[in-house]
Image (cartoon, rainbow, N blue to C red):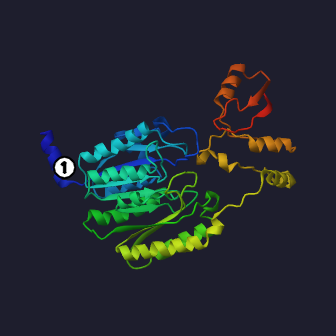
Amino acid sequence: MENLIAEYYRDHYMKLIIARISHETNTFSPLKTPISSFSPAWGAQAKVAAEGSATAMGAFLDFAKTRDAIVATPVFATAYPSGIVCDDAFEQMANAVILAVQGGCDGILLDLHGAMVTESYDDGEGELLDRLRRLAPSVPIGVALDLHANISRRLVANADIVIGFRTYPHVDMYETGERVARLFARLLDGESHVRNTFCHIPLLASTLCMDTRTPGAMKRALDAAREMERKDKILAVSVFGGFPLADIPDAGMSVVVVSESVPVGEAAAEAIAREIWAARASLIYEEESLITSIQRALSLPFSKGPVLLLDHGDNCMSGGTCDTMHVLKKALEMGTTSVLAGPIADPQAVAFMATAGVTWHLIMRMPIQSFQRVAPALNLITGT
């Protein structure tokens, strides 16, 4: 009886595989990223985690409801930016998706990042999509990506629809999923004339120049992408800023166009890429010296509010280890007072303080242990 019910559903209902695997890999970090960093939810729990979330996968699940589709959710996994992903972590997540597809489906919707690097693969998303395409050559695949994706030709070639966020800070994750789903519906309805085209730009733009809320080259490129979508046969245009803290061949900016015509799509991608290239100087962040920055901070009126000194190279949201003391050390040497510093990742220091207890006054050298090859320690840190 169960087999008959399963056959009925296969014959009368659409089945979609929907999954999320998201990681932005800083290949310069000495710390590997294990499966525990992703806090993965599997199967039915993945659906619970994604449903109602402001993610592309959340949008995909809402789309599936409009189609009365049967849904399989093999994994919902997200890790903060960090070092290279361990092979066993990648294989667990990838195999969960592959196993679901092996059971048969009518479509695959993936919520990925686009800048995952693993121990074995420079292009984690491209590897996953290549495996899926070989397994299901005629099944439509739609992919939502982060604006900071490092796009490869392999990724684009193995998906039918590739669309990226339009905002940084990222506030349109769900909306990006909706955009993918709208075009994906055309594929499910039998329309075959949807094509990805791709143009890579040999430019490592600084993420500090990618704020889409302020006037600049990135905002102009995204405005041009929206304008391009008004043209005949152009369905979606995505500008990817790339993630520069990745030492891989595909790192950098790119443009992906989904269109009804490959020549039209290629021309559109190249036109926007040329605009970006012409403005490349404004996508490089000109950093002043640390001493100059601190001098300028000291000259500001503290009565108007706190002054922030940001070590962007050790940014916790760009995969930094959060244990470098360069900025704090120099600031103290130059006479700054009333300084609040953090976050600082130093497990040994935390354990030492926890053992001492709240009533002790401590003198410590920090960091006790650094993950960086060259990380100056502060001679004395006192606290209670």
Does residue 77 sit above or below 175 in this rendering?
A: above
Judge the density around disc 1: few (<14), some (14-19), many (≥20) Cα neighbours within 10 Å. few
Q: Residue at x 47, y 61 (%)?
A: 164
Does residue 247 sit above or below 344 in this rendering?
A: below
Task: Check the picture and name the quadrant holding the N terminus.
Answer: top left
Amino acid type, mark 1:
Tyr
Can residue 384 be seen in this snapshot? no
Can residue 316 be seen in this snapshot? yes
Residue closer to the observer: 127 or 173: 127
Q: Residue at x 65, y 63 (%)?
A: 284
**In the picture provided, is 202 more to the left or to the right than 128?**
right
**In the picture provided, is 109 more to the left or to the right than 203?**
left
Residue closer to the observer: 16 or 248: 248
Task: Check the picture and name the quadrant holding the C terminus.
Answer: top right
Residue 250 drawn at (x, y percent): 49, 57
Q: Residue 361's quadrant in the figure? A: top right
Does residue 237 sit above or below 100 in this rendering?
A: below
Residue 48 drawn at (x, y percent): 39, 43
Q: Residue at x 54, y 72 (%)?
A: 223
Residue 50 drawn at (x, y percent): 42, 47
Q: Residue furthest bottom?
A: 232
According to the image, label 1 marks what residue?
9
Secondary structure at numbered mark 1: helix
**In the picture provided, is 277 more to the left or to the right than 331?**
left
Q: Residue 362's quadrant in the figure? A: top right
Does residue 61 sit above or below 86 in this rendering?
A: below
Residue closer to the observer: 16 or 379: 379
**In the picture provided, is 251 more to the left or to the right than 282?**
left
Residue 215 drawn at (x, y percent): 64, 69
Q: Residue 108's quadrant in the figure? A: bottom left
